């Protein structure tokens, strides 16, 4: 279940209004809220819910923005614990204070999980009216329906996204993302061509993935090389080159590109992908000893990675 944390994460940086707290000093609200965030970051959602509820109860009627902020966190944690009735109640509490896109979205998703499809659609329609040009929203709604094997209903929201006028390169990029998610790589390529040619950073990276999906490693490699020339060396771009070399069975070149990428600063996901693909490259070189050593290192770093564990288990038998 994917919660739309991209907006909730932005709340982390909000300057909440903590004045006007009942009997207690404002710091008590802030302490309880921060305690909840700390528990949330540790994936201790039950204690986070308790802390957020405590923070909410410390607020008075002059603090609607703070109440909304705290309740959004609480609803997100309830979603994580699959307390969908709780999500409904918390989001309804938020909406009594005023319209809120995230509250409509989460309550709609909770309704859908509980089989209350008409109420779910009403909330999804409400949030789509509030944010009519939010590509991520429409894709997330589609994913909710897809999880419930109701993609046909979700298609309506994807169409809303695809009907947003193409006013700038970002519009083309976002539609390319949607087509890529749907596996329509030809349409994704069509949408991404303009922003990629204009050196739109994210579009260039995604275009490389599209070419790989189309088994066109030559153009994929060219895109990643152009990306590096334009934006400098990045781990994610080198991982794309590694995938091109693997596709072309250039395993020594794949290892070299992986090592270059791993030496760079980069996101944890990019480094994980590079390390995993380095294992694959050594395995295909039939250097099982080195592949196994790297796989052991991978499992120490990412013990919950299913693909990595499968590789390690396989290599342990060689």
Image (cartoon, rainbow, N blue to C red):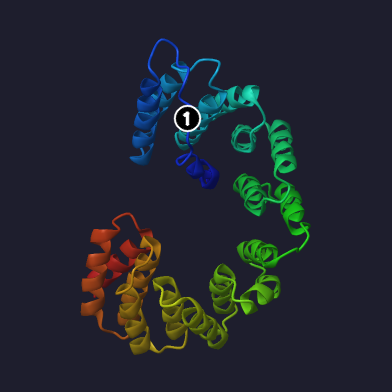
How many numbered circles are shown? 1
What kind of element bears circle 1? Answer: helix
Q: Residue at horizontal 35%, vertical 76%? A: 261
User: Measured along the vertical axis of the image, is residue 92 above or below residue 136?
Assistant: above
Q: Is residue 177 left or right of residue 258?
A: right
**Residue 162 shows in this picture:** yes
- The residue depicted at 25 percent of the width and 79 percent of the height is 288
- How many residues crowd around disc 1 within 10 Å: few (fewer than 14), some, or many (20 or more)? many
Q: Identify whether 181 is placed above or below 284.
A: above
Q: Position of residue 32 (x, y in %)?
A: 37, 25
Left or right, 105 with respect to 272, comes to: right
Q: Furthest-top residue in view?
A: 23
Residue name at image x 78 percent, y 57 percent: 163
Q: Position of residue 300 (x, y in %)?
A: 23, 60
Q: Residue at x 48, y 29 (%)?
A: 70
* Foreground residue among 126 and 305: 126
Q: Image quadrant for the C terminus?
A: bottom left
Q: Residue furthest front?
A: 19
Query: Please, is residue 212 above or below residue 296 in the view?
Result: below
Q: Is residue 85 visible?
A: no
Q: Which residue is mark 1?
A: 74
Residue 251: x, y in percent?
Answer: 36, 87
Query: Residue 120 placed where, x, y %?
Result: 68, 35
Q: Height in image: 282 above or below 167?
A: below
Nearer-the-camera pick, 142 or 262: 262
Horizontal side of 66 relative to 182 (left or right) equals: left
Snapshot quadrant of residue 259: bottom left
Residue 289, image quadrant: bottom left
């Amino acid at each position: 279940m994917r919660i739309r944390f991209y907006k909730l994460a932005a709340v982390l940086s909000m300057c909440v209004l903590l004045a006007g707290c009942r009997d207690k000093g404002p710091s008590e609200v802030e302490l309880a809220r921060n305690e909840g965030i700390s528990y949330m970051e540790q994936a201790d959602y039950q204690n986070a819910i308790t802390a957020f509820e405590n923070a909410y109860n410390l607020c008075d009627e002059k603090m609607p923005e703070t109440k909304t902020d705290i309740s959004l966190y609480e609803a997100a944690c309830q979603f994580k614990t699959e307390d969908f009735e709780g999500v409904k109640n918390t989001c309804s509490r938020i909406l009594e204070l005023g319209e809120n896109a995230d509250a409509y979205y989460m309550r709609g998703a909770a309704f859908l999980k509980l089989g209350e499809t008409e109420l779910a659609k009403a909330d999804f329609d409400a949030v789509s009216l509030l944010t009519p040009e939010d590509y991520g929203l429409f894709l997330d709604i589609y994913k909710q329906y897809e999880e419930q094997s109701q993609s046909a209903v979700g298609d309506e929201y994807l169409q809303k996204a695809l009907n947003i006028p193409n006013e700038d390169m970002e519009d083309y990029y976002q539609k390319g993302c949607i087509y890529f998610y749907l596996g329509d790589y030809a349409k994704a390529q069509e949408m991404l061509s303009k922003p990629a040619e204009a050196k739109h950073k994210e579009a260039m990276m995604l275009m490389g993935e599209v070419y790989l999906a189309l088994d066109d490693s030559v153009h994929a490699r060219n895109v990643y090389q152009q990306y590096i020339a334009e934006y400098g060396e990045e781990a994610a771009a080198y991982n794309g080159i590694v995938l091109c070399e693997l596709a072309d069975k250039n395993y020594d070149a794949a290892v070299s590109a992986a090592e270059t990428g791993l030496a760079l600063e980069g996101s944890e996901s990019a480094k994980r992908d590079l390390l995993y693909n380095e294992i694959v490259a050594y395995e295909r070189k039939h250097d099982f000893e080195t592949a196994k050593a790297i796989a052991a290192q991978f499992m120490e770093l990412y013990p919950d990675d299913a693909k990595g564990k499968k590789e390690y288990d396989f290599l342990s038998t060689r």
